[in-house]
Amino acid sequence: MPSRVVVEVAEALCKGCGLCVAFCPGGALELSPEPDARGIYVARFVEDADCRGCLNCALVCPEAALTLRRD
């Protein structure tokens, strides 16, 4: 079975700008519906998403809060 790509978000670095969500062609990211302790709606990986591994999210993130890994 081929491995799948998962996006990891460093929530402490995420500022909730939404650029990663906007630039994800596969819809693998979303902003959390609830704010974190800082009041920020951080990005999160959609668990059943089919991440394409294009790296768009990591490249546009101004905080370098995203990394991709293979499961």
Image (cartoon, helix red, strand yellow):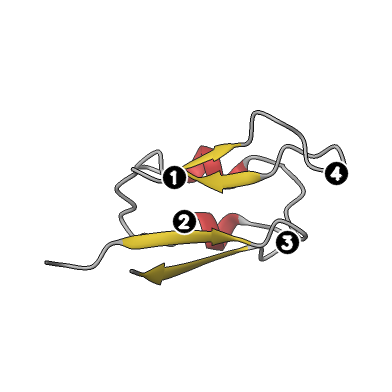
Q: State the image quarter where residue 28 is shown.
A: top left
What kind of residue is marked 3? Answer: Glu
Residue drawn where x is 77% and y is 48% of the image:
15
Question: CB atoms at circles 2 and 1 under 8 Å apart?
Answer: yes
The mark that comes first in sequence, 4 or 1, is 1
Classify 10 as above or below 40. below
The mark that comes first in sequence, 2 or 1, is 1
Question: Can you tell which mark lies on residue 41?
Answer: none
Q: Residues within 10 Å of mark 1 (few under 14, many from 20)?
A: many
Q: Which residue is mark 2?
A: 56
Q: Which residue is mark 1?
A: 24
Q: Is residue 45 left or right of residue 17?
A: left
| Residue 44 x/y as whole percent | 57, 46
Q: Nearer the viewer, mark 3 or mark 4?
A: 4
| Residue 65 x/y as whole percent | 66, 62
What kind of residue is marked 2? Answer: Asn
Q: What is the CA distance from the residue labelled 2 to the residue labelled 4?
A: 27 Å
Q: What is the CA distance from the residue labelled 3 to the residue labelled 1?
A: 16 Å
Question: Can you tell which mark lies on residue 63?
Answer: 3
Q: Which residue is mark 4?
A: 37
| Residue 52 x/y as whole percent | 30, 55
Question: CB atoms at circles 4 and 1 under 8 Å apart?
Answer: no
